[in-house]
Amino acid sequence: MTTGAPGADRAVSKVAKRPPAYSAAGVRRSLLASAPIFLVLLVLLIAIGVMNPRGFDAGYYVALLKRAAPLMVLAAGQLFVIVSGEFDLSVGSIVSAVVVGAALLTFGDPAATYPVMAVLLVFGIIVGLTNGFVTTKLRVPSFLATLGMLLVLQGGVAAWTAGAPRGSLHQEFRVFGREGVTGLPVIGELPYSVIILAAFGALLFWLLHRTNFGQQVFAVGGNARAASLAGISVARVRSGAFVLSAVSAIVAGILVAGFGGLSNRAGEGYEFQAISAVVLGGAVLGGGRGSVLTAMAGALTLSALFALLNFMGQPNAVRFVVQGLIIIGAVAYASYRLRQSGS
């Protein structure tokens, strides 16, 4: 029995051998190709040191990393979806749901902290599976599917809180995003959020760049049809990517709850910041290319840029302009790449 045209056979063979993108050499090439993001980040950090009244204070840079940690976690999760060739616009509303839900479910009871976190993680998995099902089985474009989930969650939060957040977040819940290991030389404090960021980032790096699942994510994003012909379940891989993105949003929401406190708009705008960070880190919209390390570097770069704009006295509206330009540029580049490849 034949599998199809010779072109399809060649595509299957290519996927079966493939991707330098997720081999050790491929990761190194990806990092070298994305080197400009590290250069931009360095320039921004130097500019912040010049503008900052505290100068090049190590404690300030650690505080900047602490503030950037939720976005860096989100970007690492969003990367899986983008590399697989999809989008996830629901992550910001998941963050808001986590903050509001944690306050209502714990209601200031420290004993409820870890059970509620477990419930929130299950909630994230359900949201991710739903996004994956609607996208892969019902064949709704992920942009629309996750936009719909964003609206559902926003409406649910508004209905649950009657327009104003209720309940309270106990210190036991807030400690992860708010406190850290104190008494350290030079930096003073190492925030727990930075430790969580390092551990979670390492886990996602391993998943994407060192496992068979990560290989399949790259293969599906590079050519979904060829990956399917090679025996890869495109629906399962993309659903897994959505689950990882949603779980990342849960982790980010816990950090945001600790750092920013109770607000039913805590996650507003995070979905676009995460996409901007991923494309700043060198991922290509349309799939097949990206690195966890550079996506997280893109998120830190975006946070550093926002901090510099604040030092320069620029209004928050400038943030939206910057994010819009980044996304437009990324879409234009992806379109150019598709035309060059003859797709």
Image (spheres, rainbow, N blue to C red):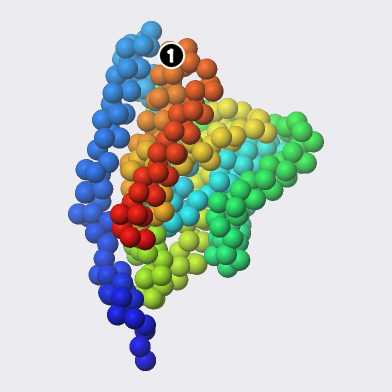
Q: In which quarter of the image is residue 20?
A: bottom left
Q: Is residue 175 visible?
A: no
Residue occupying the point 31% across, 58% down: 341
In-front residue for pair 214/275: 275
Residue occupying the point 59% across, 60% down: 140
Residue 327: x %, y % from top left = 45, 39
Left or right side of 8 for 120: right
Residue 72: x %, y % from top left = 43, 38
Residue occupying the point 56% across, 35% down: 269
Residue 25: x %, y % from top left = 20, 54
Q: Residue furthest top?
A: 53
For the N terminus, the quadrant is bottom left
Q: In which quarter of the image is residue 326?
A: top left
Q: Is mark 1 on a helix, strand or loop?
A: helix
Q: Residue furthest bottom?
A: 1
For the C terminus, the quadrant is bottom left
Can you say whether 270 is above or below 29 in the image? Answer: above
Residue occupying the point 46% across, 47% down: 78
Q: Can residue 49 be seen in this view?
A: yes
Residue that carries the numbered disc 1 in the rendered image: 311
Can you say whether 165 is above or below 312 in the image? Answer: below
Disc 1: CA contacts within 10 A as few (<14), some (14-19) or many (>=20):
some
Q: Which amino acid does label 1 sit on?
A: Phe
